[in-house]
Amino acid sequence: MPNHKVWSITGASTGFGRAVTEIALKNGDAVVATLHKPKMLAGLSVQYPADRLLVLKLDVQNENEITAAFTAAKERFGQLNVMFNNAAYSVVSEVESAAGKEMPIRAMFEVNFWGATHVTQAAVKFFREVKKPGVGGCLFQVSSMAGIEGIPALGFYNATKFALEGISEALAKELDPSWNIKVTTIEPGSFITEGRFKQGNIDPLPVYAKAPAVSLRSIISAFAERPSGANPLKAAEVFYRLADLHKPPLHFPIEEDCRLLADTDAFTSWSEGLEFTGDKVDLH
């Protein structure tokens, strides 16, 4: 397939994973689509031939399955150009409410952080060793606006995404430029996706009945009845264009209200004039 890319996509059953799978196939690319239940892509498997679409069962918590997925990609296509690292879910809980009930939260960390990290490690090795020297590839880490701003009742989900942001940024600085591996952390805001708000839940403590976190729980309930947000298919088209950039950005917020940037701009002057000028500093 000259001039076409090969994508590997985790969490391809719904949401951004499904949308990017469809956009890539529509544009003539090949896709290794991985998910818990391959039958959810039965329609696409009928629509596209084996040299365009490889559907694999993958639980990102299982390192053997991750290895097998990359081996299968090599055998079928001989290369990968883009890794869309997307599999994740959330658990709704106030920080205090989770005391003594951490099992579902630990499981979320296994998927959102450790699973994503193990996929990342395998992708970097594949880009460096399987392809021709210097060809490299794009590693898209799907984070969230929740990876740069804390949201009440999603603190532990925030923590998984903050961790993914940190390890991705460190990785990008560790990679030898000659490998030509590009890392971009995608930070979506509010989008309507089939998988949105399908997550675990830990009931709030009674003392939080009137706390701000309760408002998020109300938003989640309202969304189940009347979805709102941006179009993930349009976002997938943007992600597709991102893969064509010679130097994609390290961070890519999309449909995000940028409140953090507003705070940063408002207090920029407070960081002025702090330079050490050689005068004596007495800390006692």
Image (tube, rainbow, N blue to C red):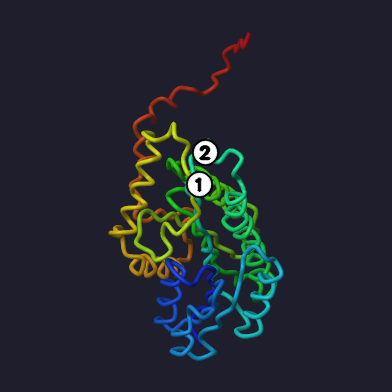
Q: Is 267 on the left or on the right of 176, as rendered?
A: left
Q: Is 278 on the left or on the right of 21, as rendered?
A: right
* Residue type, label 1: Ile
Work out which quarter of the rendered image holds the C terminus and state it. Answer: top right
**Residue visible at 44% across and 27% down in the picture:** 271
Please state which of residues 192 and 173 is positioned toward the viewer in this rendering. 192
What SS does tag 1 mark? loop
What SS does tag 2 mark? helix
* Residue type, label 2: Ser
Task: Give the vertical position of 263 relative to 63 (above or below).
Answer: above
Q: Residues within 10 Å of mark 2 (few under 14, many from 20)?
A: some
Task: Give the vertical position of 73 relative to 251 (above or below).
Answer: below
Please state which of residues 55 and 201 is positioned toward the viewer in this rendering. 201
Q: Residue beneath label 2, please?
A: 97
Q: Position of residue 227 (x, y in %)?
A: 30, 60
Report the Cα–Cα distance between label 1 and label 2: 7 Å
Q: Residues within 10 Å of mark 1 (few under 14, many from 20)?
A: some
Q: Residue furthest top?
A: 284
Disc 1 to disc 2: CB gap under 8 Å = yes
Q: Which mark is residue 16?
A: none
Q: Position of residue 73 (x, y in %)?
A: 62, 79
Q: Residue beneath label 1, please?
A: 202
Sequence-first tag of 1 and 2: 2
Please state which of residues 52 and 10 is positioned toward the viewer in this rendering. 10
Q: Position of residue 270 (x, y in %)?
A: 41, 25
**Residue visible at 61% across and 40% down in the picture:** 100
